[in-house]
Image (cartoon, helix red, strand yellow):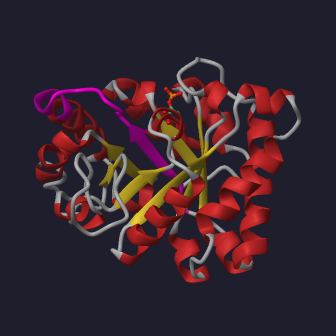
Amino acid sequence: MSRKPIIAGNWKMNLLQSEAKELFEGIKSFVKDYTAPQLPTVVIAPTFTSLCAVSSVRCDCGCGGNKISVAAQNCHWENSGAYTGEISVEMAKDAGCDYIIIGHSERRQYFSETDEMINKKAKAILAGGLIPIICCGETLEQREAGITDEHIATQIRAALSGISSEDVAKSVIAYEPIWAIGTGKTCDSVEANRVIKMIRNVVKEVSGSEAADSIRILYGGSVKPSTIEEQMSQSDIDGALVGGASLKADSFNEIIANTMKVAV
Ligand code: PEP
């Protein structure tokens, strides 16, 4: 089964609106030379304050905005109400998002997000017609203790609990070993592929073979232009969630270009 690769940039808490627009324009000017089918699915996740700024300049090439999709970095599971500081799925959609990243290790670590909260968010995102990018990953201590697979399987089972197979099939998972995020240390591609295969088996167990064959599972953790070709050459890695290297148009565009050398 061929799955369209995704290259997603997570800008985290960086860039003012004017800077975000400028970076977005730099990516847009690269993708304009390709047709949408030639490109991987390109997703950009700016801060909430820059969502409208980038959505408004999304695409003017007549592709209907297909070449670059926009993602929020988080959302709440409720539609509205007294949740100071949060945004709903509908608000993200209203600001131009097609995707929402949930369960990033930084949200789990600094904002105490639990597997149960991530499951509620995933359900709300799918009910709102958007696509969740569900992050999972182990700490260095968990890896050294030999419990990587067990930990990630628990995260995935919890995140997908009660979600229909059709909705799971459309979803995206990002495997991000925490020790590889922002550290410059990438997980060996063969090992990342092994963990991603294990995740696909968990999806198969929970949601069936069709969902397991369709769901796109990305690798994240210090992805760079020099690492992406090898990562994309693996059987089960369907793309990348990129942090640091997505903050410069040159490096992010090179990641897209190198992805096209291997897959799409
Ligand atoms: C991330 O935060 O999702 C990430 C993978 O960051 P980096 O690429 O900087 O490691």
Question: Which residue does the image show at 29% across and 61% down from the upper left?
Answer: 66
- Spot occupied by residue 246 in the image (x, y as percentages of width and height): 39, 31
Q: Is residue 80 above or below residue 183?
A: below
Give the quarter of the figure containing the C terminus: bottom right
Most distant residue in the right direction: 146
Give the quarter of the figure containing the N terminus: bottom right
Question: Which residue does the image show at 88% across and 35% down from the upper left?
Answer: 146
Question: Which residue does the image show at 22% across and 66% down from the upper left?
Answer: 80
**Would you identify the image quadrant in which residue 250 lies?**
top left
- Spot occupied by residue 137 in the image (x, y as percentages of width and height): 66, 41
Most distant residue in the top direction: 184
Bounds of the magenta segment:
4-20
Task: Looking at the picture, tell me which residue is in the foreground, 40 or 34.
Answer: 40
- Spot occupied by residue 115 in the image (x, y as percentages of width and height): 59, 55
Q: Is residue 152 magenta?
A: no
The mark tally for this picture is 0
Left or right of 89, for residue 187: right
**Would you identify the image quadrant in which residue 18 lies?**
top left
Left or right of 174, for residue 194: right
- Spot occupied by residue 84 in the image (x, y as percentages of width and height): 22, 49
Q: Is residue 138 visible?
A: yes
Q: Is residue 196 visible?
A: no
Task: Looking at the picture, tell me which residue is in the foreground, 33 or 187.
Answer: 187
Task: Looking at the picture, tell me which residue is in the foreground, 129 or 259.
Answer: 129
Q: Is residue 9 magenta?
A: yes
